[in-house]
């Protein structure tokens, strides 16, 4: 039983590290503001944001943070 629990912990730890690195730089232009402390910026469109806050209160606003600057990619040279 102890081996099964250890295996589950290892699998869970590996699943967290297997994400796509490009997803970390995603910019979401719309934010849902529920109160003065709760703001969730994770919406691509105004309609998505409004669908989320409808019925629970809150409002939608543009993300005040600018999009992340694109880092220049290194070009590979084929030899």
Image: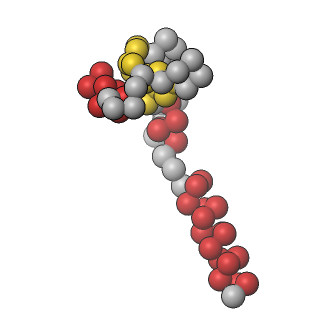
Residue at 52% across / 14% down in the picture?
65
For the point 32% across and 29% down, the residue is 54
Q: Decide which of 71, 56 is in the foreground and name it.
A: 56
Identify the residue at image location x=43%, y=30%. Answer: 42
Residue at position x 48%, y 46% from top? 20
Residue 49, quarter of the rendered image: top left
Quarter of the N terminus within the rendering: bottom right
Instruction: Say above or below: 71 vs 55.
Output: above
Q: Position of residue 50 (x, y in %)?
A: 31, 25
Residue 9 position, x and y percent, is: 66, 69
Farthest residue, direction left: 47
Q: Is residue 26 visible?
A: yes
Does any portion of residue 44 appear in the rendered image? Answer: no
Q: Tell me residue 47's x, y (percent).
A: 26, 25
Residue 56: x %, y % from top left:
39, 31
Residue at the extreme bottom of the image, as rendered: 1
**Which of these two is toward me, 76 or 40?**
40
Q: Quadrant of residue 55?
A: top left
Outermost residue toward the right in this view = 2
Along the viewing direction, whichever of 71 and 26 lies nearer the viewer: 26
């Amino acid at each position: 039983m102890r081996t099964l629990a250890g295996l589950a912990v290892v699998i869970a730890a590996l699943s967290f590290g297997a994400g796509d690195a490009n997803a970390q730089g995603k910019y979401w232009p719309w934010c849902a503001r529920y109160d003065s402390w709760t703001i969730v910026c994770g919406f691509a469109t105004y309609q998505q944001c409004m669908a989320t806050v409808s019925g629970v209160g809150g409002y939608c606003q543009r993300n005040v943070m600018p999009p992340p600057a694109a880092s220049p990619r290194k070009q590979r040279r084929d030899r």
